[in-house]
């Protein structure tokens, strides 16, 4: 199974989100069974993406706490109720701008597992050991790992496939058997090259997913 994850980040008004869905629905040729397409809008737009044919719903964040008195927090149960099946946690932007620590990420994963949502963990190669160890994964809980070199995120300068291959060689023993995605300036032009790297099971796409036709083309490379 190849995972193609769109991370819309803090983009898209509701009108833009609806337009995206319309364009995507007309340009995307579903490959159900071969490719899992996961669309991750920001919270207010989740309901707009619930019924996109051939696509699954992802979230970009979740509360590290259970339901309760945590003002402003969106909990895992609420996400599940909306049909969310995957959730990005520990993205480098969350770590950098929102102070997300390994402990917070671990708590978020526990909340997600509790309701059956699969975490997509943003992993930094330099801290992979501690980031994985903090999760305390035991093989019982599902997880997808997204390897995203910080210098390649949103810069238009993807890491070379040779470097990705080299770094994955070092990361594999740390990550184990979980599917690994590459993320960082993926486009329809380079998607196929990254998917060809041994050990890569899919892509996490930011800017390249904001244009529905471009994202459909990226999926076509799988
Ligand atoms: P990018 O973002 O595709 O815009 O580089 C990827 C990500 O941050 O998930």
Image (cartoon, rainbow, N blue to C red):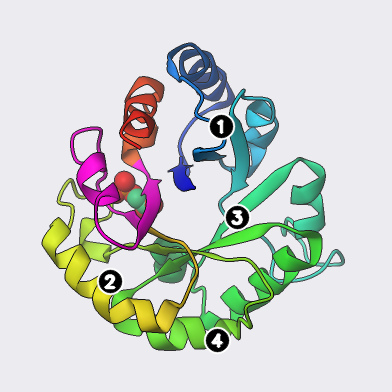
Q: Image point 45% across, 63% down: which residue?
A: 91
Residues in magenta, as a range: 182-206
First along the sequence among labels 4 and 1: 1
First along the sequence among labels 1 and 3: 1
Tell me the tag on residue 134. 4
Nearest-to-viewer mark from 4 and 1: 1
How many neighbours does mark 4 have within 10 angstroms: few (below 14), some (14-19), or many (20 or more)? some
Q: Give the distance between the C-alpha atoms of the residues marked 2 and 3, in whole angstroms.
A: 23 Å
Q: Which residue is mark 3?
A: 87
Tell me the tag on residue 168. 2
Nearest-to-viewer mark from 2 and 3: 2
Q: Which residue is mark 1?
A: 32
Residue 148 coordinates in the image, percent (x, y): 32, 62
Residue 16 coordinates in the image, percent (x, y): 50, 21
How many neighbours does mark 1 have within 10 angstroms: few (below 14), some (14-19), or many (20 or more)? few
Q: Helix, strand, or loop for circle 3?
A: strand
Residue 203 left/right relative to 34: left
Q: Helix, strand, or loop for circle 1?
A: loop
Q: Give the distance between the C-alpha atoms of the residues marked 4 and 3, in whole angstroms.
A: 18 Å
138 lies above or below 185: below
Residue 94 coordinates in the image, percent (x, y): 47, 64
How many neighbours does mark 2 have within 10 angstroms: few (below 14), some (14-19), or many (20 or more)? many
Nearest-to-viewer mark from 4 and 2: 2
């Amino acid at each position: 199974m190849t995972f193609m994850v769109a991370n819309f980040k803090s983009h898209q008004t509701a009108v833009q989100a609806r337009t995206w869905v319309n364009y995507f629905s007309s340009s995307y040729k579903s490959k159900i069974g071969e490719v899992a397409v996961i669309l991750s809008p920001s919270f207010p737009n989740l309901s707009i993406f619930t019924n996109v044919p051939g696509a699954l719903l992802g979230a970009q964040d979740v509360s590290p706490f259970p339901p309760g008195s945590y003002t402003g927090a969106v909990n895992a149960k609420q996400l599940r109720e909306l049909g969310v099946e995957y959730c990005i946690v520990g993205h480098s932007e969350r770590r950098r701008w929102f102070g997300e620590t390994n402990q917070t990420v671990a708590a978020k994963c526990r909340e997600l597992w509790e309701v059956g949502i699969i975490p997509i963990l943003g992993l930094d190669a330099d801290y992979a050991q501690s980031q994985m160890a903090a999760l305390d994964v035991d093989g019982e809980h599902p997880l997808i790992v997204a390897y995203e070199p910080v210098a390649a995120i949103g810069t238009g300068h993807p890491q070379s496939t040779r470097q990705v291959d080299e770094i994955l060689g070092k990361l594999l023993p740390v990550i184990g058997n979980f599917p690994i995605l590459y993320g960082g300036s993926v486009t329809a032009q380079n998607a196929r090259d990254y998917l060809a790297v041994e050990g890569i099971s899919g892509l996490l796409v930011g800017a390249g997913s904001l244009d529905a036709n471009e994202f459909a083309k990226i999926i076509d490379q799988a």
